[in-house]
Image (spheres, rainbow, N blue to C red):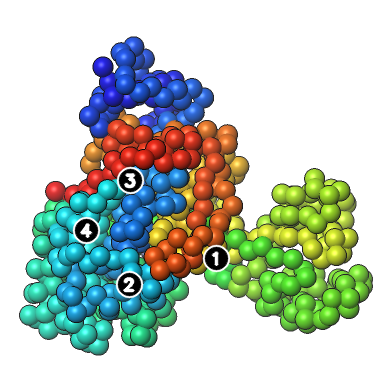
Amino acid sequence: MYDLILKGGRIYDGSGMPSFIGDVAVRDGRIEEIGRIRAAADHVLNVDGLAVAPGIIDFHTHFDAQLWWDPLASSSHEHGVTTVVMGNCGLTLAPCKPESRDALIGTFVRVEDMPRASLQAGIPWEWTTHGEYLQALGRKPLGLNVATLIGHCAVRQHAMGEASVEREANDSEIAAMEDLVRQGMRAGAFGFSTNANQRHYREDGKPVASRFAGLDEIARLCRVVGESQSGLVQFTHGAFAAPEHVARIGQWYDTILKETRRPLIGESIRHFWSEPELWRKQLNDVEERCRQGYAAYAMTSTRRTLRRWTLKDSTRFDEMPAWKKLMTLPLDQRKDSFRDRQTRVDLDKAIAESKPISFSRRWDLVSIKKVARAENKHLEGKSIEELARLLAQSPIDAFLDLALAEDLETTFEDAATQSDEQAVKEIFCSPHVLLGQSDAGAHVANANPGFGFATTMLAYWVRERQIMSLEEAIKKLTFLPASVFGIRDRGLLRQGMAADIFAFDPARIALAEPEKVQDLPAGAPRYIQRAKGIHYSVVNGSVLMKNGAHTGVYPGKVLRSI
Ligand SMILES: [Zn+2]
């Protein structure tokens, strides 16, 4: 007799091996059998026609605060996520002395765009050490499994107080930090995170504490991680560093890798139109570290920075003077100009000759998101290039004619990042790149939130764009992060592994439109985003989500690296 059987699904086991149809049986929170199962179970989920995969591991979140008021880590729980890792980017809420609470809140307010009032109202501060933080979390009901990193900023603040945001540390201060990292690792943290990003400041305008670390400090703290023989180091430094800072980042990399001989997650690699070759250089850097024998990884975001705009009120073309001049004209005059032949030639030329930072200059990447007139409904989803081909017109004519026919009310969409598909494919398919970087829990006012990074991967990049197989994508969202972090019993559907599972319809999985809600402590707003096509998620053998609704159970655990 089993507790649970998922019957008749197509199993993507997380290894990247070919999928197959079978049943998965669960007892006491673990996977007991996979195949044709004839034994009975308390619960049987018919997953015929669905894909059955290990639960998604979101390895780059900032849920450190949110879990205290939202044990489901919403909206991650709606997207098949069963494990979240927090404490990234050098930021954690532990260790923390009572007098430093406000300073740590200040880092989250500024770097992660979280409302101060919510953090003040929502964090219970039942801890001083990292171990006490994990214990306090363990006393709470949790929907998902939670793993933590020890944040360098918190460690520094604990050891040095406000001097941590003013200067390098002395020998005894570094020794105190070593003790804090050692305690955290012994308590079960999955590693250490640090941050040298020159754009990361506290709320009071001071650079975040980790930015003041000297190489000796980095070396000694990383040595502690290395001695623990578990976990990894996560290093945030931003993609666009000033030239004099690049050398310093390189020294940090060398030091971290040499001292730990543990995996390192560094570079955040994305394609930007402003620096279209940067991703290749970043990828080369990671590959070079691997050639030297280090377990070096980068991460990327599956989310494109989408922009939606109309020609009625957009600033999308403001980097090009010829366009900007037109876009500031009164509406009737602007429409007249858009009709003018010579103006069209000038606008087309402006696009061809300019080097805009965020506009791709490619009509195949600008799509018709929403039309204003019913008779144009069939054009929704098409790119301007497709429209031009359909009408046997030039793209600029097709684009402006459609907009004029709809009184400039057509909504267009394009992406400022991750829209050069060939680049995206190379980044995503690299074995050195982890898919995620959701920043879930942070940047709460972003109308394009990151919770659904895996849903985006499976719906857009795999089903629509076919940049890799579903088997490979599932591996990159489950087994790969579990392996890099050393989460040993998750990320695979195999006998003996923890029963973290999600079942979805590969033909229907999709993001819902983001929604603005007012559910943060102290009534602050944020954006959430639900999923479509995800039927079940199972955490430690209990069904957490059924057809998009929480079943009421809290089976999540605090994971420990030891
Ligand atoms: Zn982050």
In space, the residues marked 2 and 3 are separated at their CA atoms by 23 Å
The residue singled out by tag 4 in the image is: 191
* Secondary structure under the numbered disc 1 in the rendered image: loop
The residue singled out by tag 3 in the image is: 143
Give the residue at the far top of this rendering: 38
Q: Amino acid at mark 3?
A: Gly
Q: Residue at x 49, y 36 (%)?
A: 547
Q: Residue at x 25, y 31 (%)?
A: 30
Sequence-wise, the earlier of marks 4 and 2 is 2
Is residue 317 shown above or below 400? below
Q: Amino acid at mark 2?
A: Gln
Is residue 339 shown above or below 543? below
Sequence-wise, the earlier of marks 4 and 3 is 3
Across and down, in percent, residue 277 comes to: 53, 65
The residue singled out by tag 2 in the image is: 120
Of circles 4 and 3, which is in front? 3
